[in-house]
């Protein structure tokens, strides 16, 4: 998908930045309440799952309100994270993958569907993010089953090599091996 097609669906730098600010504010409240006041420890994996669920919900609401599409977020693990509908017809499915690392996303080993993806990397402060949009086929994910790990991985170095990627927030480092997250509350990057 090219940038003009992506804009048609409302997936623009400006909209993603607005959605990310909403998610960030909610994560900061969660951090203050659960991790601060209640002293609850959440792993980075737990936090990535929460960030992902918030992105699903907030993206669906924001894009439904700001585009001609009705965007629904997943109601179960078997559903695509986002589905765009127009006049009752399914138009686009998008998966959201979230990581706290700067170099790798983890997927589902037995997922059979190729999708367009929003690949998100968040910083510990919940105010800095890298977000890219691309299409991935199942064979682009590196299986880790032989290493005894369930989730396949997708490395930044492979994203960097893709011609069809669209970086919406942040950038990839000069070596092409890691992301540089963007502070979403700063005016310039």
Image: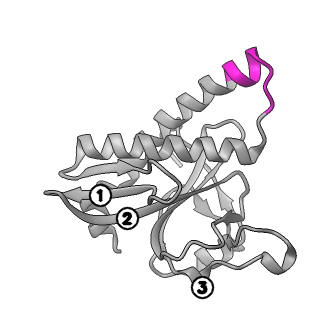
Decide which of 10, 108 is in the foreground and name it: 108
Of residues 18 and 73, which is closer to you in this image?
73
Residue at disc 3, secondary structure: helix
Magenta segment includes 38: yes
Give the CA separation, mark 1 to mark 2. 6 Å
Q: Which residue is mark 3?
A: 139
Look at the picture and state if 124 lies above or below 27.
below
Name the N-terminal-most of marks 1 and 2. Answer: 1
Q: Which residue is mark 1?
A: 84
Check the image and name the residue furthest to the bottom.
139
Residue at screen point 61% across, 41% down: 50
According to the image, what is the colour scheme of the structure? one colour
20 left or right of 59 in image: right
Q: Nearer the viewer, residue 92 or 10?
A: 92
Q: Residues within 10 Å of mark 3 (few under 14, many from 20)?
A: few
Q: Main secondary structure of the magenta part?
A: helix
Q: Which mark is residue 93?
A: 2
């Amino acid at each position: 998908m090219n940038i003009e097609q992506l804009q048609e669906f409302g997936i623009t730098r400006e909209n993603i930045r607005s959605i990310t600010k909403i998610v960030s504010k909610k994560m900061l409240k969660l951090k203050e309440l659960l991790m601060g006041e209640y002293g609850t420890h959440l792993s980075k994996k737990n936090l990535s799952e929460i960030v992902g669920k918030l992105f699903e919900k907030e993206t669906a609401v924001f894009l439904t309100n700001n585009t001609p599409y009705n965007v629904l977020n997943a109601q179960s693990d078997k559903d695509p994270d986002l589905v765009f509908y127009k006049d009752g017809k399914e138009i686009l499915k998008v998966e959201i993958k979230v990581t706290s690392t700067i170099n790798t996303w983890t997927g589902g080993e037995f997922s059979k569907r190729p999708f367009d993806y929003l690949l998100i990397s968040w910083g510990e402060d919940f105010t800095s993010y890298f977000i890219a949009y691309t299409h991935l086929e199942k064979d682009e994910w590196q299986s880790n089953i032989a290493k005894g790990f369930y989730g396949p991985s997708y490395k930044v170095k492979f994203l960097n090599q893709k011609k069809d990627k669209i970086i919406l927030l942040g950038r990839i480092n000069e070596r092409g091996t890691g992301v540089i997250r963007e502070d979403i509350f700063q005016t310039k990057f």
